[in-house]
Image (tube, coloured by chain):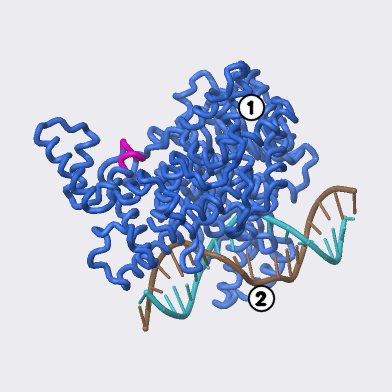
Chain colours: A blue, B brown, C cyan
Amino acid sequence: MTMQRVRSLYWVISDQWRRWCYSLREGFLSFGFLFEEEEFRVGVWRSGVKWLGVLLAEFLVANVSEGDISDIDWTSDEESETNLEAVASANPTCTETIVGNEEASSSNAARSKMIGHFVGMGFAEKLVLKAIDENGEGNPDLILSCILTFSTLEESPPQQLSTNSDPCSSGYNENFLNDLSDMDSWSEDELEVCLKGNDAYKSEKHKMLLSLAESGSLSEKEEKLLTLANMGYALEDVEIALERWPETPVDDLLEFIRVAQMAREEDCYLPEDDLKPKHILSGSSKSKKRKHFEMKKNVIEESIRLPNPMIGFGVPSMQPPERVHRSLPQEAKGPPYFYYENVALTPKGVWDTISRFLYDIEPEFVDSKFFSACARKRGYIHNLPIENRFPLVPLPPLTIQQAFPLSKRWWPSWDPRDKLNCIQTAIASAKLTERIRTVLERSDGDPPEAIQRYIMEQCRKWNLVWVGRNKVAPLEPDEVEMLLGFPKNHTRGGGISRTDRYKSLGNSFQVDTVAYHLSVLKDIFPHGINVLSLFSGIGGAEVALHRLGIKLKNVVSIEKSKANRDIVRSWWEQTNQTGTLIDFDDVTLFDSARVEQLTSTIGGFDLVVGGSPCNNLAGSNRVSRDGLEGKESSLFYDYFRILDLVKIYRQ
DNA sequence: AATACTATGAGGTACATC
DNA sequence: GATGTACCTCATAGTATT
């Protein structure tokens, strides 16, 4: 790793404080790097580039936090552990260490936990202590906000490297990076780590392993090591890979190693070649390297692709895809189980970000057309088992003709549709359908092809169905309810307008799809579950669980719209639920105190379910399709925040 | 004041063709 | 590969009507 490479790292923070902190806590350093004036974000889902980032980060952490770099002006205050230590504490054991150093007189375990929590997020302990002293320990959100204020006051977030030397701010990054380039300050040990890719080191270690193998005293890990080394891979790479993913099969390790090698190949462009491991460079021409580089770029852009057919891990009506097993990272495993939903066709990079926050779990993209007569392409990220799912019965109609048998009589032969498009929040006006009718009445029999094309275009655009001779109409609200799997008149009453019914329905889950995924909970929780439902809307998740026959013990529902809350409340009473329904209106105000209180009251949430606002992601939005940072869609981060709190308090 | 209507494309994916 | 074609999308803001 050349120092030039290290210098080109920069930290993606600026106005994105929260993400940075959380990513840090998750163990993924959320930084990017610049290469030839192009920006690369690190941490892209399942792309080799993330691994490159992890590799770089581990290198930095290993070599700096453990070493004694005397000329870095961290601080004169020994209490300040520096944020860098917190970076190291992306490894949870390190967090514990820091908490453990906390004076034993601090018998208050909650305080300790709290400090550890924030330090683990990457804040300097000094700031954390200060914030806790000022705010007490009762309200973590307040403390977080206070810490952020301190941090912001003490620095201006670096877009580029500068010379900020404040140890309590991210200025440490800059010092740390700049000073890394100063080789004089490196201890011999550190240099040895840098150099250990060279041939001498490699062959010696390799020889040692070979001799151990002869005596038959190799551990499983060493055996893997030797296997890969014999295949010609650098021991250095194999060791790093094995250390990080000890349980990983050899095939996956190979991919990691390949990425590591590509990382070093990139370094070939840079002037300082001294530290380069020679075994990787031999015979690689510049054009070949360029090819690699471009390939990696594509990896970023195409890191998440939609499956075709869009059936996720399988749907009832089709043969399951080849892959029927998945392994989740330890930290993602339930309980609590969680289920997150949003539109599949977002602006680029959005699902990468969402996945990165939700434990790097691969999104399951499913089109509800396999569960309903209407399409609904959505992505779901969850930690539920994917074996032994079962669908709701009765199976809903899967074609327009089955769903609307009366329409057959009026359906013209030149309208080939058997599925409706995605149900949205607005419907066609009566003017449009009237226009279509008058156009059609001008011609006997089939209209001219141009007219047919126009009408088909409008029918697809507005999801129109044939309801009479020459007469098309938008779906009625109760028909939408049926297509989405809700009971008839679910959204009726309560003073809600027709327009708002369409809006609420258009923003909802497709119940059969969600229920199919949630069905595995029935065996896990035979006596019922406690549900935290964020962005509940008209209660798609609740209806799905109820229809699955899963008893709802306690449901805490957070929904902004009063009309929607009333709908869920009304449904709750109509269905004679024996559990308790508690509702809140503002997800941003749902803080740790509430989570703690509710957790202790009901005994822990078993499921956190929700689909965060899509309006800044959805293609229909021509005004404010701003991506995940949009006004409403950024509430996704609250989903993550609250899920995180639920996990903390459930322990 | 509440509700209904209307104008407003970009940004993708998927597939065929060259 | 490059290019062209067909198709689809959990919406919003302003205006008109009830």
From this view, report whether residue A472 is shown above or below residue A476: below
The amino acid marked with disc number 1 is: Val
Residue to which mark 1 is pinned? A555
Residue A90: x, y in percent? Answer: 49, 38
Q: Which residues are magenta?
A: A241-247
Secondary-structure class at tag 1: strand
From this view, report whether residue A291 is shown above or below residue A164: below
Q: Chain of mark 2?
A: A
Which quadrant of the structure image shows residue A389? Answer: top left
From this view, report whether residue A240 is shown above or below residue A263: above
Secondary-structure class at tag 2: loop
Left or right of A456? Residue A154 is right
Residue A136: x, y in percent? Answer: 73, 26
Residue to which mark 2 is pinned? A442
Q: Nearer the viewer, residue A491 or A135?
A: A135
Q: Are marks 2 and 1 in contact (CB under 8 Å)?
A: no
Is residue A458 at all visible to an observer of this figure?
yes
- Spatial CA distance of label 2 from label 1 is 56 Å
Q: Quarter holding the N terminus of chain A?
A: bottom left
Residue A100: x, y in percent? Answer: 52, 24
